[in-house]
Amino acid sequence: MSVAGDVSTILASGVRLTGPLAFAACGEYIAERAGTMNISVEAMMLGGAFASVATASATGSATIGLVVGAAVGFAVAVLHGTLAHRAEINTFVVGLVLNSLVLGLTSYLIAVSRFDSHQVSLVSIPLLRDIPMVGRALFVERWPVYLLLVLVPLTWWLVERSRWGLELRAVGENPRAADVTGIRVNVRRRQALMWCGLLGGFGGAYLAVGEVGSFNQNMTAGRGYIVIAAVIFGAWRLGRTMLGCVLFGLADAMRLALPALGVTLNGQFLIAVPYVLALLAMLVFATQYREPKALGQPFERGSS
Amino acid sequence: MDPAGGAASALQLLGITKSYGSVVACDAVDLAINKGEIHGLLGENGAGKSTLMKILLGLVHRDAGSIVYGGKPVEINTPQVAAALGLGMVHQHFSLIEPLRVWENVILGDVGRIDRLAACRQVEEVGLRYGLPINPMARVEQLSAGERQRVELIKCLRRDPAVLILDEPTSVLTQAESAELFSVLRRVVQEENRAVILISHKLAEITAATDRVTVLSKGRVVFQSATGDTTATELARQMVGREVSLRAEAAALGVLPVEQYRVELASAEQVESASPDRPAALRLRELEVDVGGVAVVKRLSLDVRAGEIVGLYGVEGNGQSTLGDVLSGLVQPTSGSIELGGVPVELNRPGALQRAGLGIVPEDRHRCGVVLDMSVAENLSLKALGDIGGRHLLSRRKMHAVARRLVAEFNIVAPSLDAPVRSVSGGNQQRLVVARELSANPTVLVAAQPTRGLDVAAIEDMYLRLREAASSGVAVLLISTELEEVMELCSRVAVISSGRITGVLSIVEATAERLGMLVGGMAA
């Protein structure tokens, strides 16, 4: 195979692997700006992936699968919010429990059921797809990918320009001052979490009925954690977070492509690459890193 | 009562009473605030100022009394009602969100669509009108304390309040910034006929900036006057007079152990006269401490000699908590030194102060005095693990023996030695801290607000322990906001105001006037 062909293949595969990360990262970004270190994004993605395949098989429509996948992610978020805010269980504990729960549940369900394969359709953009090397990689995609063109600016606008986003940032930085100003801190945090649920579920669903067309056990395989790493890599800025997703997507594509290119490198090592990258980025940019000050800290009214 | 009441009155409080359990925070307070005046509210900690303002803002509900606003009686049940009526407050601790921009902070809490340009314009307009220049696009974290204060004021004034309440607004400001603030307030009352309530304990501020002044003490209005008709000296006496005279009364009635008091006085004088060349047991030299870029403790020097109890007295928030943290080893001073027995302590090593022989009863025992979920016995032996075991293993038997001895010696009441400290009362937790600190045989004992939140028996007990420690030769530094406590225990009183020691008085020199002046940041 020619070098151009290799590049094109890796690029195409990288874009496909970036998609699910980017959807979920938009959600995780919002949740973290509001102060919730949402570990259960892994559960949201995995639950969404399973639900989309099951629904697509039952209805025959991959698109309905996507919608139901997002809904299941939303349900995980509601559960997380209820346990963390109303029952006041530590949010990290809730996240870990939900991740294990969803993994166990989907592994069981996939073992006892059989689903037909469905996949959303490809959209190819005329003219642009004929650009050498990158054309086929970037402009012949499953249609949900193009939603990112709307979703990313929308997420930016919501957080940086809307009143909801302003209150969200206030809550993530200084919940007590926000409370004094009359903002309902935990309500805003739950709303952010639900956004994250919708987008995480959608990201997982896109992975299943978009790219792969079926579900297998532990399909997301830690992509939720990669999403968290991308937000950290992005220093809690949306643009850099998206860049992180692309980098991690490409690293994943390299891992899959290397054997075919005749390079023998331990695949397990490449799985670690995104995390090593995130750590390095944190070290290098340490001085610029400004995480939301109240990230991961629960808020309770009246206590001081 | 109030000659200027009636039509010009913006706000009247009538017989406001509020108790927390058996503590009366406000006792039938009458207060009339007129339009077009700056009304000073002067008082120490616990005088009832904050409770009164919280009632006005709908944060606390009164037990009795009524509020008349604009000629009509009103019920202020929530902060929203207060805001709708036109009562605005600038809180002592800023309620700004640092990473956000100025305009974002100002519109936080509104509803509806965000219009950045309109918000910025409004910030500039309000700023221009009151002489509060600020760049609306600046991030709050990059602003100085004075500029942050401006943002708070703009946030408040934008809502067009009829009554503006400021709680200790100058505690973090420089002199120039304070002067600027007061000229703004003057404009607010003169040109726009609003009313301003200025809560403060600084006498200079009250005499310079207010039109009328009300002094609160122990929840009661003890003095009210036009500011021009009174003096700083008079206000100082009114502010702290009750406690000082109470003490005299109590001594006359024989309630206080006068004999012991005399003995202490005598010994204090002895120490004082005998020891100019003897090194102090504890010597603080030119301590400077910054917290978040703000100088909280400024060039603070103080000596405490063996066998004396020195009180560090002042209104809360004047740097004494930070000094307590420094003496606990939690905060490192930016400059200056601490000497124990004439030897400077290396403050960058954890536990260095403790090893040098300093025991500490910290201000917040739950934060750094005890480990709530560990047992009584474990907490008692935390400082002396070497005594109860070898290099790697602890002997439960030895630990229990030590604990049993201390529990008996310090009258600690606990269900068992293995009960978690969480399960014993506050008074017993404090006894435990004292027992642990004294059992290490310190040469210096620092007690920060040691009786806060304790019942009478536990307070008595604490006083006894501190006196015993001093008479056995320990140098005791008592950091306290309770004047009665300082007057009862100490032979010398150092007064702290805005992070500086404004004066050190021996107990015989400590008249109400002089203390009041020092607390108010003036020389006496």
Image (cartoon, rainbow, N blue to C red):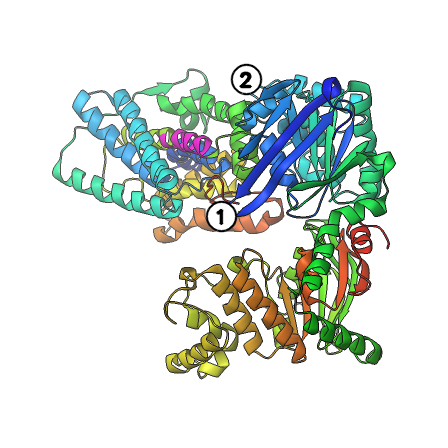
Is B404 left or right of B61, judged from the image as shown? left
Q: Chain of mark 2?
A: B
Quadrant assignment, res A73: top left
Q: Position of residue B314 (x, y in %)?
A: 72, 54
Q: Residue B201 placed where, x, y %?
A: 74, 45
- Label 1: few (<14), some (14–19) or many (≥20) C-alpha neighbours in 10 Å: some
Residue type, mark 1 in image: Leu
Q: Is residue A150 left or right of residue A202?
A: right
Give the residue number, with chain letter if any, for mark 1: A277
Question: In the image shown, does A132 or A293 lie closer to the viewer?
Answer: A293
Which residue is pictured at 83% across the width and 35% down the height?
A: B227
- In the image, the segment drawn in magenta is A186-197
**Circle 2 or circle 1, nearest the eye:** 2
Q: Is residue B133 visible?
A: no
User: Is B403 drawn above or below residue B335 in the view shown?
Assistant: below
Q: Nearer the viewer, residue B409 or B322?
A: B409
Rounded to the nearest angstrom, the CA distance separating label 2 from label 1 is 41 Å
The chain identifier of the residue carrying mark 1 reads A
Above or below for B185 versus A92: above
How many residues crowd mark 2 within 10 Å: few (<14), some (14–19), many (20+)?
few
Q: Which of the pair B240/B179 is nearer the observer?
A: B240
Where disc 1 sits, the SS reads helix
Q: Under tag 2, what secondary structure? A: loop
**What's the amino acid at mark 2?**
Gly
Q: Looking at the image, is B486 positioned above or below residue A269?
A: below
Q: In terms of depth relative to the viewer, which is nearer, B472 or B100?
A: B472
Can you say which quadrant of the picture contains the N terminus of chain A? top left
Q: Position of residue B336 (x, y in %)?
A: 77, 65
Q: Residue at x 55, y 78 (%)?
A: B439
Q: Which residue is mark 2?
A: B112
